[in-house]
Amino acid sequence: MEPNGCAGNCPDCANKGASQEENRRSVLSWLLGGGAVASLGSFLYPVVRFLNPPKITEAAVNEISAGKVQDLKPNSGKIVKFGSKPALLVRLSETEWRAFSAVCTHLNCTVQYRDTTQQIWCACHNGTYDLNGRVVSGPPPNPLEEYAVGLRGDEVIISRNA
Ligand code: FES
């Protein structure tokens, strides 16, 4: 029963009910529309971010610590992070070290040290480099960028050649 005593059949009550129904529908429409826009946005935002990545200039990393001397035995190599790219540290003997960019100059695969041949090898297309970074065989068009290696106490330091 309505507060005015009507059972809900008078024109005022009918208009009020219709108006409440319209309000409910508009709220529902608004919520559904907002949800659809939010869903579409959550789908499109990563796509747009992927297609247009932020312009982050790579922080110029000129030197890194590649670990302790005792962590790498002679005639072995390991990949370390040099800024955003991999570098290959090779320990040839007790006192001889080499370091290179580990990015193959062919199609950017990561190269590795092969102790059996004492060469640097790219598994992607069987490219090989010598221990000066020069191409020995395979498709790589250019030598590997060589880095300087120094010791600071028992820490191995790799740095870009000036
Ligand atoms: S990517 Fe290294 S040989 Fe092709």
Image (cartoon, rainbow, N blue to C red):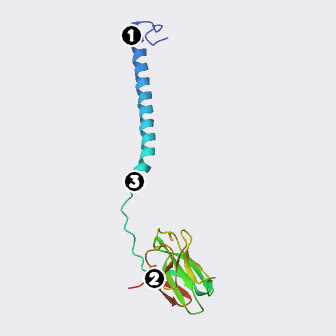
Query: What distance separates the C-alpha of mark 1 from that of mark 2?
Result: 88 Å
Question: 108 or 34, which is in the foreground?
Answer: 108
Q: Earlier in the sequence, mark 2 or mark 3?
A: 3
Residue at 38% in and 64% down: 56
Mark 2, mark 3: which one is toward the viewer? 2
Q: Secondary structure at mark 1?
A: helix
Q: Which residue is mark 1?
A: 12
The image shows residue 69 at horizontal and vertical percentages of: 58, 87
The image shows residue 103 at horizontal and vertical percentages of: 48, 73
Give the amino acid at mark 3: Leu
Crowding around mark 3 (Cα neighbors within 10 Å: few <14, some 14 to 19, many 20+) is few
Q: Which residue is mark 3?
A: 51
Q: Quadrant of residue 60?
A: bottom left
Give the amino acid at mark 2: Glu
Residue 37 lies left or right of residue 70; in this view the side is left
**For the residue with label 3, is its CB less than 8 Å from the closest atom of ligand 1?**
no
